[in-house]
């Protein structure tokens, strides 16, 4: 700021004071200030009105419940169904099972079985008529509590083929436990898996890698073996044919858009914090139908967006007509691989 004393007052400084007075009290400046204050008032009013706006429950239409059926089936399993009813997005109640459902099961359009009894665990079961590879199965589900029944169908895919598999180790660390005569530790690396893709067919796969872990009742000197359990390891992949690749997960979804009919080698990175020398890994490659693929894909997308406040809601895929759920066939192949470390 310029300070002017009586000794330094000149014609130019006097003119400057005059300009300041003119600019301060000029009518156009007053109008500008009034307009600014008015605009600020309007803006604040809009913000306050926006903050006070709330949605009423009536703004969200509550649709009537529909039947929901869930069933995964393959050639190695008996039939197993769960039937429930859909809930509103605003309903936090637990899923309510339908215990008076009637399920008609068809193979290639012919009635195989009618299932109407539910087990104590809430599942409808049929121990007869195992699914067959390449055959189309369909269901009709009704209940006296619902006006309309639901329908779904799917075809059992061909079992996938793993031609070869190997392990490339990039980092490892082991501790030799002399007391129990075994070694355990950490291994980081990649599985190189070669699969044979069926030609001229849209194939979809799910890949998991696990090992059978021994469970003991105690960890004292006299450890008592209890049972074996399947333990999945963390895997990921940067391959362009993998749909749900992320930092690490327990399964990968694969499509054959770019590898149709090829013998293709897939590189899958892994971390195993319970590694053991000469450990047996089981590579499970599952051939799934398009319906099963889209259902699993949207489930993954929904789970990944759960903690993102800016994510768009994900509609879970369903192949059930006039209702919800999934009726999906699959076939699995397992390849055993003993670790080279």
Image (cartoon, rainbow, N blue to C red):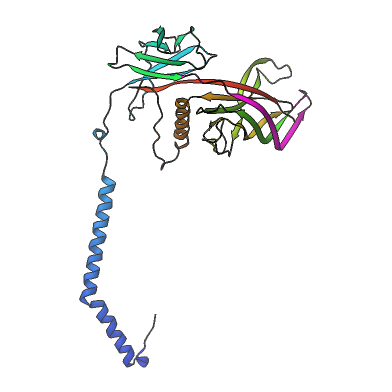
Examine the rendered structure and indicate whether residue 267 appears above or below residue 149: below
Apparent side of residue 238 relative to residue 293 in the rendered image (left or right):
right
- Magenta region includes residue 174: yes
Apparent side of residue 74 relative to residue 214 in the rendered image (left or right):
left
Q: Is residue 299 something that shows in the picture?
A: yes
Residue lying at 38% horizontally and 10% vertically, measured from the top left: 104
Apparent side of residue 160 relative to residue 16 in the rendered image (left or right):
right
Image quadrant containing the C terminus: top right
Image spot of residue 47 (x, y percent): 28, 52
- Magenta region includes residue 291: no
Residue lying at 56% horizontally and 34% vertically, measured from the top left: 259
Task: Compare residues 102 and 97 and report the one nearer the observer.
Answer: 102
Overall secondary structure of the magenta stretch?
strand
Residue lying at 57% horizontally and 36% vertically, measured from the top left: 248
Q: Say how many tags the image has.
A: 0
Apparent side of residue 202 relative to residue 43 in the rendered image (left or right):
right
Task: Compare residues 92 and 98 and report the one nearer the observer.
Answer: 98
- The stretch in magenta equals 155-183
Image spot of residue 155 (x, y percent): 46, 19
Image quadrant containing the N terminus: bottom left
Residue lying at 28% horizontally and 83% vertically, measured from the top left: 19
Image spot of residue 14 (x, y percent): 30, 89
- Which quadrant of the view contains residue 286? top right
Task: Compare residues 286 and 144 and report the one nearer the observer.
Answer: 286
Q: Is residue 117 something that shows in the picture?
A: no
Image spot of residue 95 (x, y percent): 38, 21
- Which quadrant of the view contains residue 277? top right
């Amino acid at each position: 700021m310029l300070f002017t004393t009586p000794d330094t007052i000149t014609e130019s400084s006097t003119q400057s004071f005059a300009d300041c007075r003119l600019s301060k009290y000029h009518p156009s400046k007053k109008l500008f200030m009034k307009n600014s204050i008015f605009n600020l008032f309007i803006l604040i009013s809009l913000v306050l009105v926006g903050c006070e706006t709330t949605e009423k429950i009536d703004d969200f239409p509550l649709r009537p419940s529909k039947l929901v059926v869930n069933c995964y089936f393959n050639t190695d399993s008996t039939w197993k169904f769960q039937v429930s009813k859909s809930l509103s997005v605003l309903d936090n109640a637990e899923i309510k099972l339908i215990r008076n459902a009637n399920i008609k099961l068809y193979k290639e359009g012919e009635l195989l079985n009618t299932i109407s009894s539910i087990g104590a665990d809430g599942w409808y079961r049929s121990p007869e008529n195992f699914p067959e590879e390449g055959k189309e199965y369909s269901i009709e589900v009704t209940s006296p509590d619902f006006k309309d029944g639901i329908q779904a169908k799917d075809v059992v895919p061909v079992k996938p083929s793993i031609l070869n598999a190997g392990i490339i180790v990039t980092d490892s660390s082991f501790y030799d436990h002399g007391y129990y005569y075994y070694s355990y530790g950490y291994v980081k690396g990649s599985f190189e898996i070669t699969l044979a893709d069926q030609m001229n067919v849209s194939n979809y796969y799910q890949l998991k890698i696990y090992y059978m872990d021994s469970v003991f009742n105690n960890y004292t000197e006299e450890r008592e073996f209890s049972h074996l359990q399947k333990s999945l390891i963390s895997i990921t992949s940067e391959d362009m044919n993998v749909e749900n690749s992320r930092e690490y997960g327990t399964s990968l979804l694969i499509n054959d858009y770019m590898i149709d009919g090829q013998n293709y080698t897939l590189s899958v990175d892994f971390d195993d914090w319970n590694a053991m020398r000469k450990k047996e890994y089981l590579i499970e490659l599952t051939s799934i139908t398009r319906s099963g693929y889209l259902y699993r894909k949207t489930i993954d997308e929904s789970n990944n967006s759960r903690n993102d406040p800016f994510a768009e809601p994900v509609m879970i895929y369903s192949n059930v007509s006039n209702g919800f759920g999934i009726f999906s066939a699959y076939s699995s192949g397992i390849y055993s691989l003993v670790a080279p470390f």
